[in-house]
Image (cartoon, helix red, strand yellow):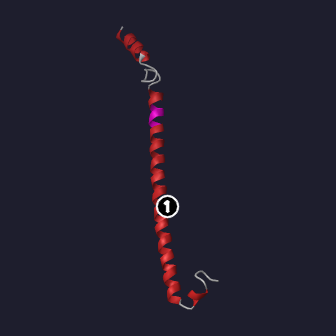
Amino acid sequence: MGLLGQRAVSNPSAVLSALVSKRDNLQDELRVIERQVEHGMQQLLSICMIYDLETTYLQDSNQNGSVLKGFEGFLSSSKSTAK
């Protein structure tokens, strides 16, 4: 009938105890979920930071060269500066 059935209504102490226990369980579940969300946010921030660093590297090394494209631009700019 109610939350804990007909028999529990006759014992308010049992109802209170059951509700407190349920509340504690829900609070524990909430803490676990909050930790998971926090961990996920930290991973997302790490991924965004790596993406930004890689983007900056590729943009900054566009003229002189990079590990991916080679360093021909750097070598040619060094030769023209040395002359």
Mark 1 — residue? 33
Q: Residue at x 58, y 88 (%)?
A: 7
Q: Residue at x 43, y 15 (%)?
A: 72
Q: How many marks?
A: 1
Task: Residue 73: say if magenta.
Answer: no
Q: Percent position (x, y) of residue 14?
A: 50, 86
Instruction: Indicate the amino acid at tag 1.
Output: Ile
Task: Residue 54: say if magenta.
Answer: yes
Residue in front for this viewpoint, 47 or 53 = 47
> Hey, which residue is sitting farthest left in the picture?
82
Q: Is residue 10 left or right of residue 25?
A: right
Q: Residue at x 60, y 80 (%)?
A: 3
Q: Which quarter of the rendering shows the C terminus?
A: top left
Dot 1: element: helix
Q: Which residues are magenta?
A: 52-56
The quadrant in which residue 65 appears is top left
Q: Percent position (x, y) of residue 71?
A: 41, 18
Q: Main secondary structure of the magenta part?
A: helix
Residue in front for this viewpoint, 11 or 34 = 11
Q: Residues within 10 Å of mark 1 (few under 14, many from 20)?
A: few
> Hey, which residue is sitting farthest bottom in the picture?
10
Can you say whether 36 is above or below 47 in the image? below
> Hey, which residue is sitting farthest front in the picture?
7
Can you say whether 48 is above or below 59 in the image? below
> Hey, which residue is sitting farthest top in the picture?
83
Q: Percent position (x, y) of residue 66?
A: 43, 23
